[in-house]
Amino acid sequence: MPASRLCSTLFLVFAFFTLQGQNVSPFIVIDQFGYCPDAQKTAVIRQPQTGFDSPSSFTPGAVYKVIAVASGRAVYESGLTLFNNGNGATDTPSGDKISWFDFTSLTVPGEYYILDEANQLRSYPFVIREDVYNEVLKQAVRMFFYQRAGCEKEARFAGEAWADKASHVGTGQDKNCRLYNRKNDAATERDLHGGWFDAGDYNKYTVWACNYIEAMMHCYLENPDVWTDDYNIPESGNAIPDLLDEAKWGMDWLLRMQESNGSVLSIVGLAAGSPPSAATGASYYGPATTLASWSAAKAFALGSKVYKQIGMNDYAEQLQTAALKAWNWAEANPNVLFHNNISANGSQGLGAGNQEVDESYRRLTVRLTAALYLYELTGEKSYLSIFEGNIRQLPLFIWTNYVSQYWADDQMMFLYYLTMDGGTKSIKTLIINALKTGFNEPVDFAGRIGQDGYRSFIEDYNWGSNKYKSDYGVTFYLLAKKSLEPDKNDLYRSTAEDYLHYIHGVNPMGLVYLTNMNRYGASRSLTELYHTWFDHNSAKWNKVTETTPGPAPGYLAGGANAYYKWDGCCPSGCGSSANNAMCRSEEVPVNQPAAKMYKDFNTNWPLNSWEITEPMGAYQIAYIRLLSKFVKAKNSANSIFPPAFSGKNVNIFPNPLKGEVNIRAVANIHSVDVYDISGKLFEHYLLSGQNNVHRISTSHWDRGIYIMKIQLANGAVVEKIFK
């Protein structure tokens, strides 16, 4: 592919336009959604040296300003800081020379842009606001709603553009699914409807779905106050955070995948179609495997903990029972494998990706994580012994303090263990020392802070680089939250946020790596991505234009991939002249710096756009987990009603409640206020203040979560109650 054609074509995406006499420039990149007031705020000023945009020359002015959109006046100005310790060396992953414009001290809410007055160039507009990412989080979580199999996407939830009937529920599909190698045997039929399409394909993979559910549980546990009940999904308004409603959709499918003996089926292969309801082919499932069962055990166990916390006791008990059954079967059958995409199994490619893991240490991580959650859930020391007795077989120890972008699951597991109740002090010390040493090696993680021009170092721009960016960000946030190195907490937190800014536009492409987000604050979000629904040949969903809706909002693409290439048959061996012509149907990223190996496109074989633009649940939930750390808590009990003293001063029972709730306090009760989960006052009881016992009838209350504020003579207590 001629480099000149690629350069000229790709650079058109940076076409300038004029606002108030100044051109919006691709050389000034910012988080296009904006910044929280207390965030570190750094615009990246880029001078391309290599790659598709290098023919364009640019010399930044000496002084940059922040301009308030409303008044047109400068509210802050400063000089630039040269990247690479001021020596001006080119940033290797991007091929750009870089300067940084720091405007952290600007904290006043408002809408702004960055101005290079000397060149009359400006950035896209952005806002500074506490809740700048709240709507972004909703749209990112809603991606899983669009990915639901067997769920009608009514227009009131999905939007008119993406409304669709329930998919894969016809004859021979998910509700009458048969075993892949006994397709004519009605005795193998199982109802396996529900779950999520895993990626751009429609297949449902147990191991990966378990990972997504596990991560959703961590999202909730790490920052419960940010999760609201207004994401406009079918379950919204039921007084359960919509993140947990979405996770339950996946969990319910997982329960259907469990056999009566506790084993868990490995995969359901689904037919393709655009929209999903157009798919008419049969669905087939793969056999139970050890890895699927261990994975399900960890998802069920952690899910049981979370759903019990929000008062869904019956469901929590169901999940605990399922977790124990899955664990027991896997322990009794530790070597049952199924490589679903290898035809030697007779599967003939059941699913596009292979979720089976052969490496003993990767399988061990899943087993030990399940044991850890089961110990926390049951208190049984045998599970803790399995965890603590086997961790030295993992890379952190066998490879001498080894941490890596490819071992995020291990690292997250260890960080969780460190703050969990229980555990052996010497084991925790061992892990802390290994993690601190590993994360501070000069070649990666903390050792590379400040050594990436776009302030978001990753070791390798591989397939799914946006997931690795998100994982790095979450890791730094957890290092700060768990205070492994207290003197670095502020540094680690601000570094975590820089990885978020990368995905939101602080990257050499100047792109928000989410689809169709311009209506939610982005100026230049993705218009295409590889997906069966949003197919390249679709006149409606292929691309966002003035007349076509394109893909649904909020999908995170895989991201820049240094290893991307068109199919090996190109340019002349693809079987026909028509196929060969497809190799040159459009320019693709070739011979670019790693961080520029991306294009906003959606072309199938032989250009293989899936290697950079395909979404996946793994990418999405990693980003959601990072994003949620910087979302303002909204209408939470803790933020609205901070308790004056411990809830031990008041006993509320039963909780969860049924027909009535009893309140017994150490002091006389003056009033009781009950709020629904949105923070709206639901009931008010003004008492005489002469009694420390009060009973309230709740027969007229709907099922859900409530916040109760009990005012005593010497303070107030706030408690969450459930019906």
Image: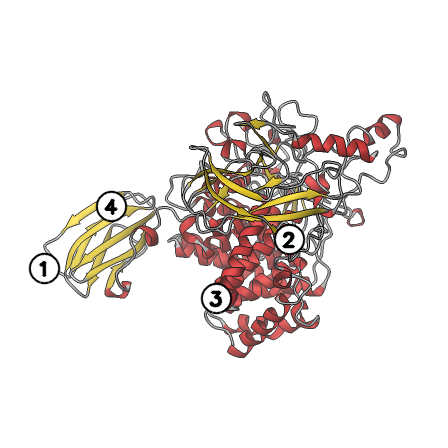
Local packing at callout 4 (Cα closer than 10 Å; few below 14, some 14-19, many 20+) is few
> Which dot marks residue 505?
none
On screen, residue 192 versus residue 587, left or right, reads left
Q: Residue at x 28, y 62 (%)?
A: 647
Instruction: Pinpoint residue 101: horizontal percent, then vertical percent.
Output: 56, 47
From the viewer's perspective, is the residue at label 3 or at label 4 nearer?
A: 3
Dot 2 or dot 3: first in sequence order is 2
Q: Position of residue 12 (x, y in %)?
A: 69, 30
Q: Check residue 699 in the rendering and tell me which mark sits there, or answer none.
A: 4
Where is mark 1, residue-wise? 690
Task: Examine the rendered structure and indicate whether residue 234 appears above or below residue 633.
Answer: above
Separation of marks 2 and 1 at Cα, in angstroms: 68 Å
For marks 1 and 3, give the one nearer the viewer.
1
List the residue tagged with mark 2: 83
Q: Amino acid at mark 3?
A: Glu
Kind of residue at badge 2: Phe
Circle 2 sits in a helix, a strand or a loop, which is it? Answer: loop
Residue that badge 3 annotates: 376
- The amino acid type of the residue labelled 4 equals Ser
Q: Nearer the viewer, residue 85 or 158?
A: 85
